[in-house]
Image: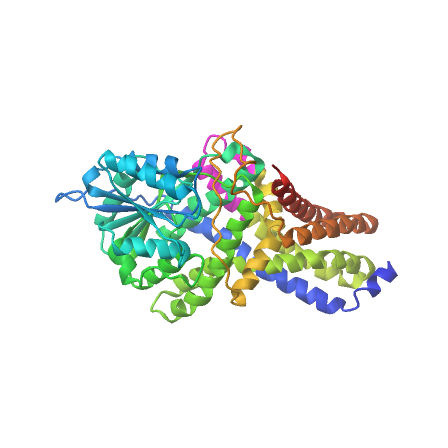
């Protein structure tokens, strides 16, 4: 053991860096407690749905941005055309940036519904300029509607969607956007989809709801929402300089004084990625894009004439993904600290102090428990058992998401990589032969597997040192990195 301690001579620096990293994770982790606190204060606040305007049903343009979505295009258009809204007050734009045979398939589907009397057009671009934001902007330029509804290809909106969202624009001044809660078509497909559902339920059932009711800024989630066309134009239209154009536009619009409404009781079903490499690509885009927006928007937020609490919460909202590099630091430092604790008993006070950081974990657990109780009153206690799996998976994604954070910080531009859609809705549906499935093993996978091996060694060291309190923490890291890395290889190799 004395030999091992010689490998970490800078123990004071390591202890300080570990404490700093844990403090940052603790600060962001306590945000879960803040959200639960505001939830308790605002949960009885009811939002009354206004009536449609007496002078007629407003015109709505529904935009459907697509890129190589051959498996889900028909399901999407069918659900849009089944909406309970007058045909003559609904325009549908299929904004197709595809590069494969889906272009002709989409054209035929659009022609079929146009023959049935729907105002539906197929707009095909070949340059993908601005990616999704560019397609939305081009469609907006010719849109007939006073309001713009947007749905990604993996959504299956309910017939009553417009009837339940459009009236809210007439219930107050300067209502610029209405967002609905995502539901999950395939939540019970696998442990991967269940963990994703747990994470998204926390965001939608608690975070979006609380931020909206408490008067903080919220974001349009890129889909399953409706914009007032005037709001988009007034806020400067869609920008291409970040890969989360939805969050960017949301903040610019709210800084212009537009109000948003989040409807927790109106849901829009969507398909969760059933293949882990697709999920990791989605997480990479969301993580990187949000940090890009934080760099772009937060200076303006702090200069704006806004309450301090709104500025602080905006910073936590947009800056939350900065935690991932510190998760990596905590992971790497954990094993050396087990050795330091074992051979340097004079630092016992330091490790006793570390107990306070468990409050962040309790805060996070409470946050997701309340979210599950809010949505699933009957079986919330069964669903929350997935929390350790969710936490381990979050740790396992830290390599993937840290790379996203660093690319955003250092202004490395990357292509907008859309999440492939598989049309997996129920147990038994297959995705393995999907033509859009990633067959490439990303280099971060090897880092994830190396981290898993590192923590296997760490567990052995903790057993040797009889530091049993460190083992559950290390086991979660080992499990998270091993599963994320292992599944990445397995899913890429599956035919």
The figure's colour scheme reads rainbow
Whether residue 371 is in magenta: the answer is yes
Viewer-proximal residue among 207 and 227: 227
Q: Is residue 478 left or right of residue 8?
A: left
Q: Is residue 302 visible?
A: yes
Viewer-proximal residue among 233 and 21: 233
In the orientation shown, which residue stands out farthest toward the right?
A: 2
Which portion, as a residue range, is magenta? 364-385
Q: Is residue 31 visible?
A: no
Residue 2 falls in image quadrant: bottom right
In the orientation shown, which residue stands out farthest toward the left?
A: 55
Q: Is residue 142 left or right of residue 393?
A: left
In the orientation shown, which residue stands out farthest toward the top?
A: 428
Dominant secondary structure of the residues highlighted in magenta in the image: helix
* Quadrant housing the C terminus: top right
Residue 350 falls in image quadrant: bottom right
State the image coordinates of residue 267 (x, y, percent, origin top left): 37, 39
Whether residue 372 is in magenta: the answer is yes
State the image coordinates of residue 484 (x, y, percent, origin top left): 63, 45
Viewer-proximal residue among 60 and 172: 60
Q: Residue at x 43, y 56 (%)?
A: 244
Q: Residue at x 22, y 51 (%)?
A: 146
Residue 140 falls in image quadrant: bottom left
* Quadrant housing the N terminus: bottom right
Q: Residue at x 68, y 55 (%)?
A: 331
State the image coordinates of residue 363 (x, y, percent, origin top left): 54, 49
State the image coordinates of residue 418 (x, y, percent, origin top left): 47, 49
- Total labels drawn: 0
Look at the picture and state if 230 lies above or below 201: below
Q: Is residue 112 left or right of residue 19?
A: left
């Amino acid at each position: 053991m004395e030999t091992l301690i010689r490998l970490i001579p800078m123990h004071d620096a390591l202890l300080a860096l570990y404490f700093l990293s844990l403090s940052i994770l603790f600060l962001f982790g306590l945000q879960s407690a803040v959200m639960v606190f505001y939830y308790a204060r605002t949960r009885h606040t009811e939002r009354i749905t206004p009536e449609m305007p007496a002078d007629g049903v407003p015109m709505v343009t529904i935009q459907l941005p697509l890129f190589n979505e051959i498996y889900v295009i028909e399901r999407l258009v069918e659900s849009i055309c089944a909406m309970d809204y007058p045909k003559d007050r609904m325009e549908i734009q299929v904004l197709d940036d595809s590069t494969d045979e889906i272009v002709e398939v989409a054209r035929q589907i659009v022609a079929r519904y146009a023959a049935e009397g729907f105002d539906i057009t197929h707009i095909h671009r070949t340059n993908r300029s601005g990616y999704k934001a560019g397609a939305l902007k081009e469609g907006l330029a010719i849109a007939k509607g006073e309001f713009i509804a947007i749905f990604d290809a993996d959504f299956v909106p309910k017939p009553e969607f417009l009837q339940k969202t459009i009236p809210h624009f007439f219930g107050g001044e300067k209502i610029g956007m209405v967002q609905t809660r995502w539901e999950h078509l395939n939540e019970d497909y696998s442990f991967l989809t269940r963990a994703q559902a747990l994470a998204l339920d926390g965001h939608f059932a608690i975070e979006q709801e609380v931020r909206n009711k408490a008067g903080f800024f919220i974001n349009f989630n890129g889909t399953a929402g409706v914009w007032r066309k005037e709001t988009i134009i007034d806020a400067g239209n869609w920008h291409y300089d970040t890969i989360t154009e939805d969050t960017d536009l949301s903040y610019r619009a709210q800084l212009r004084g537009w109000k948003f409404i989040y409807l927790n009781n109106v849901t829009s079903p969507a398909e969760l990625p059933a293949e882990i490499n697709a999920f990791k690509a989605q997480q990479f885009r969301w993580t990187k894009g949000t940090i890009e927006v934080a760099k772009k928007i937060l200076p303006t937020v702090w200069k704006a004439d806004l309450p301090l609490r709104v500025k602080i919460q905006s910073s936590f909202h947009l800056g939350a993904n900065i935690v991932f590099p510190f998760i990596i630091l905590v992971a790497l430092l954990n094993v050396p600290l087990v050795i330091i604790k074992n051979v340097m008993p004079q630092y016992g006070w330091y490790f006793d102090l570390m107990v306070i950081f468990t409050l962040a974990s309790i805060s996070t657990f409470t946050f997701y428990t309340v979210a599950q109780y809010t949505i699933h009153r009957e079986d919330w206690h069964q669903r929350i058992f997935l929390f350790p799996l969710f936490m381990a998976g979050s740790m396992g994604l830290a390599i993937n998401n840290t790379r996203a954070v660093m690319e955003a910080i250092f202004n490395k531009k990357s292509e907008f990589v859309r999440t492939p859609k598989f049309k997996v809705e129920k147990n038994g549906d297959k995705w393995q032969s999907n033509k859009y499935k990633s067959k490439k093993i990303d280099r971060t996978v090897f880092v994830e597997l190396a981290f898993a091996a590192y923590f296997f060694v760490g567990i052995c060291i903790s057993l040797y040192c009889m530091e049993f309190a460190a083992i559950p923490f290390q086991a979660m890291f080992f499990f998270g990195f091993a599963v994320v890395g292992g599944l990445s290889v397995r899913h890429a190799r599956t035919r």
